[in-house]
Image (cartoon, rainbow, N blue to C red):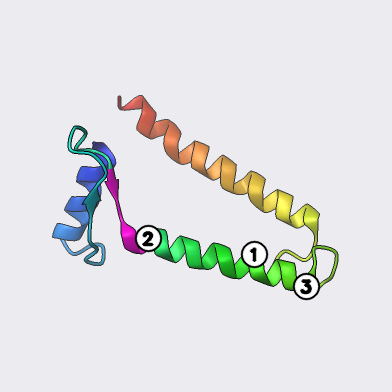
């Protein structure tokens, strides 16, 4: 509920771009989905994955260049999600 109301307020005060917000459930108002954000993440993921497949994980032409760098990026993103979610979970 907190993130949903925060997102709606940011858009209302024009601190965030106007995005279409969809509720994922009629029973739970706090669960929202931003279709534009989902599409942007999907396109970025496909582009990075395609560049890695084209160059191969052992060549020097890919985004991450080595599988070790790819695993480091995964660890950093997982840690970032945990750090972002922990304060939110304390609110409930």
Q: Is residue 87 magenta?
A: no
Residue that mark 3 sits on: 55
Q: Quadrant of residue 55?
A: bottom right
Left/right of residue 81 with respect to residue 31 in the rendered view: right
**The C terminus appears in which quarter of the rendering?**
top left
Image: 44 above or below 86: below
Left/right of residue 83 with respect to residue 66 in the rendered view: left
Question: Marks 3 and 1: in contact by CB < 8 Å?
Answer: no
Counting other residues with Cα less than 10 Å from the Cα at mark 1, is it few (<14), some (14-19), or many (20 or more)? Answer: few
Residue 9 at x, y percent in the picture = 17, 52
User: Residue at (58%, 48%) from the top-left corner?
Assistant: 77
Q: How many marks?
A: 3
* Lower sequence index among marks 1 and 3: 1
Residue 79 at x, y percent in the picture = 58, 40
* Lower sequence index among marks 3 and 2: 2
Viewer-side residue, 65 vs 29: 29
Q: Which residues are magenta?
A: 32-36
Q: Quadrant of residue 45?
A: bottom right
Q: Residue furthest left?
A: 12
Q: CA distance from mark 1 to mark 3?
A: 10 Å
Viewer-side residue, 87 vs 25: 25
Residue that mark 2 sits on: 37
Residue that mark 1 sits on: 49
Closer mark to the observer between disc 2 and disc 1:
1
Q: CA distance from mark 2 to mark 1?
A: 18 Å
Q: Secondary structure at mark 2?
A: helix
Q: Secondary structure at mark 3?
A: helix
**The N terminus appears in which quarter of the rendering?**
top left
Left/right of residue 71 with respect to residue 6 in the rendered view: right
Q: Residue furthest right?
A: 58
């Amino acid at each position: 509920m907190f993130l949903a109301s925060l997102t709606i307020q940011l858009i209302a005060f024009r601190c965030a771009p106007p995005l279409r917000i969809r509720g994922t459930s009629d029973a739970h108002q706090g669960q929202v989905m931003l279709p534009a954000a989902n599409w942007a993440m999907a396109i970025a993921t496909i582009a990075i994955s395609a560049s890695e497949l084209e160059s191969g994980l052992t060549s020097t032409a890919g985004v991450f260049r080595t599988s070790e760098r790819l695993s480091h990026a995964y660890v950093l993103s997982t840690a970032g999600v945990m750090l972002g979610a922990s304060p939110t979970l304390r609110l409930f």
